[in-house]
Image (cartoon, coloured by chain):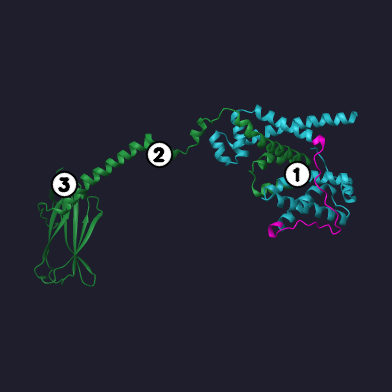
Chain colours: A cyan, B green
Amino acid sequence: MQLHSFDAGYVDSLCAGDRQTQEHFVGYFTELLQLKLRSRLQSPHAIEDVRQETFARVFSVLQKNGGLRQPESLGAFVNMVCNHVLSEHYRSAIGGESLDAEGRPEVPDKGADALEIVTARQSKDKVREILLNLEPRDRSLLKAVFLDERDRDEVCLEFGVDRDYLRVLLHRAKQEFKAEFLKRAGKQAASNAND
Amino acid sequence: MNHSEAVHQMAAERYLLDELTPDEREAFECHIFECPECALDLRFGAAFVEEAKAQLPELTRGLPAFVPPRSSSLETKRKWWQNLLQPAFAAPAFATLLLVLGYQNLVTYPALRAAANQPRLLAWAPLHEATRGGAHEVITADRRHGVALPVDLSPQPGMGVYASYSFDLYDPQGKLAWTGLTAANAGEASEGQRISLVIPGAMLRNGTYAIVVAGVAAHGERNEIDRYVFDLRLTD
């Protein structure tokens, strides 16, 4: 996970069909689209359909127009296209066929590489560490909210906390998780630079 | 929603907790597609939540069962009226209510029914028509029995026959306390009639009362016939 901003060069590479740029583009926006769509669509199949259709249309428009007038608004453009596809999905079933008239294959989700597998292992360890460092009450609170999916107000009343407490609890856990990851990412980047 | 608002409002946390309104969610999602920092923040949050969901069953299973204690904050959260339903207050309140209902049904109402349905003795207090400048007649009565005032309705010479008679009772404050109407005896118009005005004890006060009697013709015209003014003195 890295910070990335989109500029004219990035969009030009995307339009030119640069594989690495396309993979980065798909990887970056796949997660955001899934976060957006899972609150609106029940079926993983439907989420995947909308995701694929969104990317297909974005590529199609970029290639037809040769880019965007404002490259830095690439993210907003993707979101807008997703909203249109979602509206159409609500109105009728989308077959999942690509809009790409040339029949070019879609950019698939790339599989996890060795670094990502290690990263995933480290993620698990860090999350476990964060959870174990919590008070038992806070652990039970997170379980009630995220795993048992109980009503938030009911849970807060039972645990004698308010909604702010719950938000701050999640915020601190997230920040600790993120800090650890960014620290490792920084070390990795420094190590790669020295090689 | 801009970056500052997203951070200040803890939008990422509220998004993951599903606390945003539809408009707020739309605005935040629009923002994360444009703001790499907030997008990264949300992705870390989502990754933590997903992994936590996978690990919490094991982590909470191995620990002693946690029973959240009822804190004082829970007590204060109870609404004030709910305290009225607590046994310490509700039980005596219901007991008192039962006592009141029982007394009313077993004592008060039977006594009232008996008073209404049984004969009783009540002495007349004869009235004399008020005279200009004359001292008021004094009538004694008690609140338990009230007072019965006989009124003679004699036909007035040259006034014709009345269809009915009206009675207006004025209390010691000069206010009209009561008004009533009785039909005239058609078959005995020349002989007049006697009416008893019974004033219940609850209405009685010490002071000067006035009774104004008027004849009411068939077409509605009223003519004052008699006026009785008396001083009432209560014996109880």
Residue labelled with disc 2 = B85
Residue labelled with disc 3 = B144
The relative height of residue B32 versus residue B151 in the rendered view (above or below) is: above
Quadrant in which the N terminus of chain B appears: top right
Give the mark nearest the N terminus, 3 or 2.
2
Residue labelled with disc 1 = A31
Q: Residues within 10 Å of mark 2 (few under 14, many from 20)?
A: few
Magenta highlight on residue A102? yes
Amino acid type at mark 2:
Leu
Residue B104 location (% of width, % of height)? 24, 45
Q: Residues within 10 Å of mark 1 (few under 14, many from 20)?
A: some
Q: Which mark is residue A59?
A: none
User: In front here: A158 or B143?
Assistant: A158
A144 relative to A79 in the view: left or right: left
Residue at 15% x, 52% y is B230
Cα distance between the residues tagged 3 and 1: 91 Å
Q: Secondary structure at mark 3?
A: loop
Q: Chain of mark 2?
A: B
**Mark in front: 2 vs 1:** 1
Amino acid type at mark 3:
Arg
